[in-house]
Amino acid sequence: MSYNESSQIKNWMFSNERLKQLREQCNNQHKQVILEKTPSSELNILCPDEELSLIHYYETKTLEIAMALNLPDKVSATAIIYIKRFYLENSIMQYGPKLVMLSCLFIACKTEDNHLDIDYYSNITKASPSDITNLEVIILESLNFNLIVYHPFRPMYGYILDINDNFSLYNNTNGITPVKFDTLWETCKKSIQKSLFSDCCFEFHPQIIALACLNLNWDGFNMYIENKFKDKDQEFLNSMIGKINQVKEVLSNVPDKPDLEVVKKIDRKLIFLNNPEKEKRKSKKDPNKNPKKKTKPSTSTPPTSTDNILNNDVTTTTTTTAATTLISEQTTTTLISTEMSSNTTTTSTTITDTEMVNLDSTN
């Protein structure tokens, strides 16, 4: 099946206005459900922008976990797209993003023919196999079983290969940096990964995103466009350049990493929303009392990087050298386990990071 006949172009392409409408609609629907059950929870209900901020945080964690597991780029990219699509149909106030993230990554491994054993994956992520698999059907239904995702990686590879095949043309031109295939590929790939944390996948075709990333990373882009599309009319070129510039503008507004202070505040609201009793207990505490806890000298041996897991926590650890290094450098995030009731629609997630306070520990 070609891209032009794919479910991606038929079912998952939206304007910016339509995306906002879908997210507001989803948010309002679940907001009404919450208010009907617990009217007192109104202050902790998340707005669409807050939901989007928390989703963005877990998208970045998806990439980090995939890198720790040495998964191919297309697996992490597909998982992130699944998360985005899922939350166009559902609210994070209904399904906590941590388990959705883990389930989407597991599904993406199967979709992209990079299968992981469920017991191994469960052991690495410290989430039970049932927690991971219980959401699979819900996610697949929300995706309308549209599992094939087209990414900018493939057209980007083709463009750079084309440039490399015409090495003499582009490398003998004054003012243009000589092309090194591997270097250009790696820098462009980082831009593509950055695009995953935006709505580019909903608004622009993969080829346009690839060209925009190439434009951002190579000063010979204009000359390449003139040669590559010399048979196209000016109207086509103007339209394409206009879309490329739109993508570049979107990418310029994507933060390098989520604002953890903002994420922490949003997550606190989500905890209290799904666990009102926690907020009540917290409000009853006397702020003037700050009893000192007696501590006993520790006689146990310090945990290793792969053993540094708090009770009931989920840490993206792995026994591979790369993952151990990643964790020991504290570049991955500890994701505190989801508190779930017997109904999965009341999932609550807490977050901690090397830069964040464990929210549960404050109660």
Image (cartoon, helix red, strand yellow):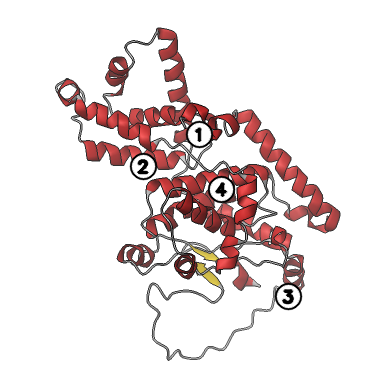
- Across and down, in percent, residue 90 comes to 67, 47
- Residue 190 disc label: 2
- Across and down, in percent, residue 151 comes to 43, 37
Q: Amino acid at mark 1?
A: Cys
Instruction: Tell me which label, 4 or 3, sits earlier in the chain.
Output: 4
Q: Nearer the viewer, mark 4 or mark 3?
A: 4
Q: Amino acid at mark 4?
A: Ile
For the residues labelled 3 and 1, the Cα–Cα distance comes to 48 Å
Q: Is the residue under label 3 in contact with that under label 4 (CB below 8 Å)? A: no
Neighbours of disc 3 within 10 Å: few (<14), some (14-19), many (20+)? few
Q: Could you tell me which residue is drawn at 44 percent across and 45 percent down?
A: 256
Left or right of residue 338, residue 214 in this image? left
Q: Is the residue under label 1 in contact with that under label 3 (CB below 8 Å)? A: no
Q: Dot 1: what SS? A: helix
Q: Nearer the viewer, mark 3 or mark 1?
A: 1
Q: Dot 2: what SS? A: helix
Residue pointed to by mark 1: 200
For the residues labelled 4 and 1, the Cα–Cα distance comes to 14 Å
Is residue 80 depicted above or below 97 in this figure? above
Residue pointed to by mark 4: 83
Instruction: Tell me which label, 3 or 1, sits earlier in the chain.
Output: 1
Q: How many marks?
A: 4
Q: Is the residue under label 1 in contact with that under label 4 (CB below 8 Å)? A: no
- Residue 241 disc label: none
